[in-house]
Image: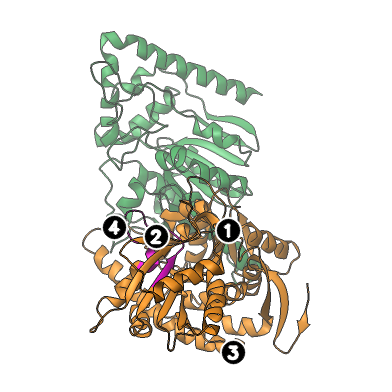
Chain colours: A orange, B green
Amino acid sequence: MNKIKQNNFKIVAITGAEASAQAMRQINPEVIAAYPITPQTPIIMKYAQFVADGVVDTELVPVESEHSAQSVVVGASAAGVRAMTATSSAGLALMGEILGVASGLRLPIVMNVVNRAISAPINIHCDHSDSMGTRDHGWIQIYCESAQEAYEYTLIAVRLAESKGVSLPVMIMQDGFITSHGVENVKLYSDSIVKKFLGKYHPKHSLLDTEHPVTVGPLVLPDYLFEIKRQQQEAIAIAKKNFLLIGKEFSKISGQVYNYFEKYRMNDAQAVIVTMSSTVGTVKQTVDNLRKQGKKVGLLKIKMFRPFPYMEVARVLKNIKIIGVLDRSFSFGAYPPLVSEIRNALFNLPNKQPIVQSYVFGIGGRDIKIEQISKVFQDLLAKKYNQKIKYIGLRN
Amino acid sequence: MDNLKRILNQPSKLSPGHRSCRGCAAPLIARHILREINQPVVVASATGCLEVTTSLYPQTAWRIPWIHSAFENAAATISGVESAYRALKKKGKIKKEIKFVVFGGDGGTTDIGLQSLSGALERRHNFLYICYDNGAYMNTGIQRSSATPFGAATTTTPVGKVKQGKELLRKDLTKIIVAHQINYVAQASIGYWQDLSNKVKKALAVKGPSFINVLSPCPLGWKFSGDLTIKIADLAVDTCFWPLYEVKSGVYKITHQPLKKIPITEFLKPQGRFRHLFKPRNKKLLQRIQKEIDRRWSELLALAKK
């Protein structure tokens, strides 16, 4: 490990998985429960080493399934402590039922998801079919481009989950293998600064407060469920506001800007690609290449997918002539998830709407290359579009 | 010598006014067991009769901290609560001794929740798991479970022209739990309250997890009048359908030997779910049930002799 000591941080060459584990080490939650699944495993393996070395004092619960992993953190969070887990693909799917319990009980759990394709056929590589399949389970979802983001957003997620009016679980996504196993330079902020930022968790209720007993998870019939779910919708809307406030606080540490999305060379762009996660890096390189040739192209990287920032996205995209949205998952029988949200955001614009072309790429870890992204930009600039989904890198 | 008056004078942690059926054994079991716990206690329930009848929002019958998460994960949920407790205890942020108890029905324990229970037992969390076994999915409308006895009519093993109720034997959950080699496993009946009290005390005194399987007669599903609950719970013991025993650190002990082992028909007869078995053509089925009861009882006697 190369360490370049500076004032408040050190730069280390680590994988995305280790970046998440380092964030978890600094959070040092009371309880972590997890079950092995590729490509999540290096996160918990690293964390188990922290436990074995006495670097953290977390109760690490090595459960017998992801269903139990999520159930354990639900129990721990209801007992008023910080609780975390991590998973991928089938593991996330197995947690499915309890994801709704975690958000419905308003428990501020933080989970790292290392994106991997959903079976069948079985595949261990990256696409977003796992986390996209859980987009309506009431969790806040943030997609990370790099190991650095996986580190920082895991820290921010703790504050966001616990923030006033929110009290909801957060998923932090990174791309399987590409980010989780790829080594990058990551700036780790000093433990004392991060601990100060995280503060202490003060739960409103705890099962362990036996003098003030609470009933958690009651039976609720038609007379109350609607109101409770409406409150949940309000809570996730508040998360949008709090995300910016907490991001501002974190930018004092990092000097970076934390927004729902990142605009890249979009100012005078005629054609823009909208996408998420590690592919953003390849698109940025492509934009730079094409800009050198005088092509007016840009990129919008979406970070926050739930709650989706409709108004803000509409504001930055409204004057773009043509947009290509690159989804890394299917929504079988429908347009893919990201393009659906982008069209939703643009639909009520008072004037002429931008043209939106849907693309699907990278399924099951299929590589996407600069030449392929260049071709997308060229097609967009040439107004080659239709209502169909176009597939990048698909053999005939 | 224990006395029922002393127990009943303990404040009840489960309040009256819950919505369970007349004669339901589940709240009797929960109330009795919780009265034996003098320390602060946190309860988790699996989805099921006890859960839905005690927690109808915006009211609650629970006077102690209580959590319900889902059907199959009560043991995992309490693992999380107990792990949080241990984490805080380690840091000195919590001083008091807290006990952790789970209530799950037979569906939530022998079927859908078996995996999470097995995992929690293997991990040696400190909790007491109570299975209240009413022998079917009563909450969803009397569907068969792996704990439903042979020959019982349920809504998914109905009696018809060619079928005479459940054709498979009951899973022996208590033995499955014993195989986890935890320090205390027992089988109890609400009919023998003193035996149940003793077992709760022993279960809470051991290190790590403990387990008690309690027979929970169900007037609705077993089809008997609600005033017969305790009588039927007694008959289950006296016929050796439900022997009272414990396994402490691997040592079997029968905690109540019936003075006279009475025929299984005495337990079956008052229950509508077994009515069809008393038709002359089903005589062989009754014989088969008695044979299986005898086999399991002598097996248990042999284990207790060792």
The one of B2 and A144 positioned closer to us in this rendering:
A144
What residue sits 36% from the left and 43% below the top? B26
What subunit carries mark 2?
Answer: A
What subunit carries mark 4?
Answer: B
Residue A100, labelled with which disc?
A: 2
Number of other residues with Cα within 10 Å of mark 4, as a class: few under 14, some 14 to 19, many 20 or more? some
| Three-letter code for the amino acid on which mark 2 is drawn | Gly
Q: Position of residue B138 (x, y in %)?
A: 31, 39
Q: Earlier in the sequence, mark 1 or mark 3?
A: 1
Q: Label 1: which residue?
A: A33
Mark 3 or mark 4: which is in front?
3
Q: Label 3: which residue?
A: A255
Q: CA distance from mark 4 to mark 2?
A: 19 Å
Q: Earlier in the sequence, mark 2 or mark 1?
A: 1
| Three-letter code for the amino acid on which mark 3 is drawn | Gly
| Three-letter code for the amino acid on which mark 1 is drawn | Ala
Q: Quick one: quadrant of the N terminus of chain A? A: bottom right
